[in-house]
Image: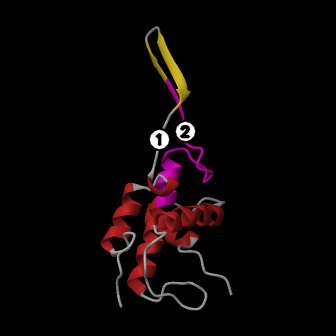
Amino acid sequence: MARQPYATPEQLAAWTGQPAPADAERLLARAGEDIDSALLTAIYRVDEDGDPLDPEVRTALANATCAQVEFQLAAGDDGTGAGGQWDSVSIGPVSLSGRSSRTAAAGVELAPRADRALRRAGLTPGRVIGW
């Protein structure tokens, strides 16, 4: 069997207080990839499918994934990572535009709430928990 997604559309709806978007499963899968990238060196117990065994870790990963989707939607990102990559600023007769240069750890712009959920659970990269 394959690893289960970190969060469900129902969990996303509960997190945001809004109905889950029609493409919630795709958004959650993409956000889960971002969470995986942020945790490349995190160590926690998993079952044979790679799903976390500790309920607190499962909850933290679900919360972080939902926070990542919420953040991306607020930034106008459809899960592709392209949201917010271009600038356009106008002030009176002055107009500036062009590609913004944003960098992020592990190649991912992690939502602040997602980062906090992972840190509270002790899932910062390289930290061993629950052994």
On the image, the x and y values in percent for residue 7 come to 53, 73
Side (left or right) of 128 relative to 102:
left
Q: Is residue 7 above or below residue 88?
A: below
On the image, the x and y values in percent for residue 48 come to 59, 91
Which amino acid lies under the numbered mark 1 shown in the image of this protein?
Answer: Arg
- 116 within the magenta span: no
Dot placed on the residue nearer the N-terminal end, 1 or 2:
2
For disc 2, the marked residue is 85
For disc 1, the marked residue is 102
Q: In the image, which residues are magenta?
A: 68-88
* Residue nearest the viewer, comparing 10 with 72: 72
Give the label on residue 23, or none.
none
Using the numbered discs, state the Cα–Cα distance from disc 1 to disc 2 in whole angstroms. 8 Å
On the image, the x and y values in percent for residue 56 come to 38, 82
Side (left or right) of 17 relative to 21:
left
Q: Is residue 126 above or below residue 116?
A: below
Q: What colour-coding does the image apply? A: secondary structure
Residue found at the far right of this picture: 1
Mark 1 touching mark 2, by CB under 8 A? Answer: yes
